[in-house]
Amino acid sequence: MNHQNVSEIFFEETYCVPPEQTARALFARLPHGSDYAQRLIECLATSYLLAVIESICIREMQLHVDTATEVVVGRTIQIDHRAPIPPGSLLKLRGWVERIGKRSATFCVQTSDAHEVICESSVTLVAAQRVLMESRIAAKVGAIVASPGAASSNLMAGLTDREFEVLH
C-alpha cells in the first residue's frame, strides 16, 4: 500500500438512485422480509447506500495497492443514515482519508441530496495479503463442503499472530 498516495485521496461522486434499490424491493427478495416488504417506504435501503459508499472507497484505495499481492477489504463501517432518499434522487458523495494505519485507511464520507445531508459515514478498509485471504476463504469453503450447514470452529487454527493481525 502506498501510504503517501492513500493519505491524499479525496473524491466527489454522483449517484442516481435506481428503483430496484429501495428497502421495499430489497426486502421483498429476502426470506425474512418478504412478509412485510410492501409496508416499507419506497426509499433507498440503507444497505444499498452502504454498498455505494464502500464501493467508491474501495475503488479509490485499490489504485494505491499492489493488487497482485494485496486485496482491499472492509473492516469497520459506521453509518448515520439521516434522511429518506426516494428513487431518482441524485446523490453527491464527498470523501477523504481521515486516518491511515500500517495496512489500513479510514475514509470519512458525506452524502447529500438536493435538499440536505442524508448520510455521514466512516469506512475503514484494510490492504490485506491476498494469499492469506484466499487461504481463509478456501478453509471456509472446505468446511462447508465437508459439513454442509455447519460452521467450522477452528478456521483460524494455524495462523500466526502476525497473519491474524493482518486479517483483522
Image (cartoon, helix red, strand yellow):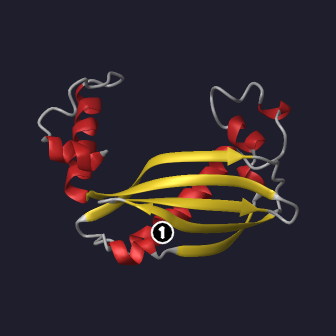
- Quadrant where the N terminus sits is bottom left
Q: Position of residue 82 (x, y in %)?
A: 77, 46
- Disc 1 crowd, CA 10 A, few/some/many (<14, 14-19, 20+): few
Residue type, mark 1 in image:
Arg
Residue drawn at (67%, 66%), measured in percent from left and top?
93
Q: Is residue 140 left or right of residue 50?
A: left
Give the SS element for disc 1. Answer: helix
Q: Position of residue 113 (x, y in %)?
A: 81, 63
Q: Residue furthest front?
A: 99
In this orientation, does residue 164 appear?
yes
Relative to 149, is 67 above or below?
A: below
Q: Is residue 149 left or right of residue 118?
A: left
Residue drawn at (49%, 74%), measured in percent from left and top?
9
Q: Looking at this view, is 164 or 46 the one in front?
A: 164
- Residue ID for mark 1: 59
- Quadrant where the C terminus sits is top left
Q: Looking at this view, is 108 or 13 the one in front?
A: 108
Relative to 105, is 2 above or below?
A: below
Q: Is residue 104 left or right of residue 33?
A: left
Q: Looking at this view, is 107 or 34 the one in front?
A: 107
Q: Position of residue 32 (x, y in %)?
A: 64, 26
Q: Position of residue 63 (x, y in %)?
A: 40, 75
Quarter of the figure with residue 47: top right
Relative to 127, is 34 above or below?
A: above
Relative to 144, is 83 above or below?
A: below
Residue drawn at (26%, 24%), measured in percent from left and top?
147
Q: Is residue 142 left or right of residue 29?
A: left
Residue drawn at (59%, 59%), measured in percent from left and top?
53
Quarter of the figure with residue 137: top left
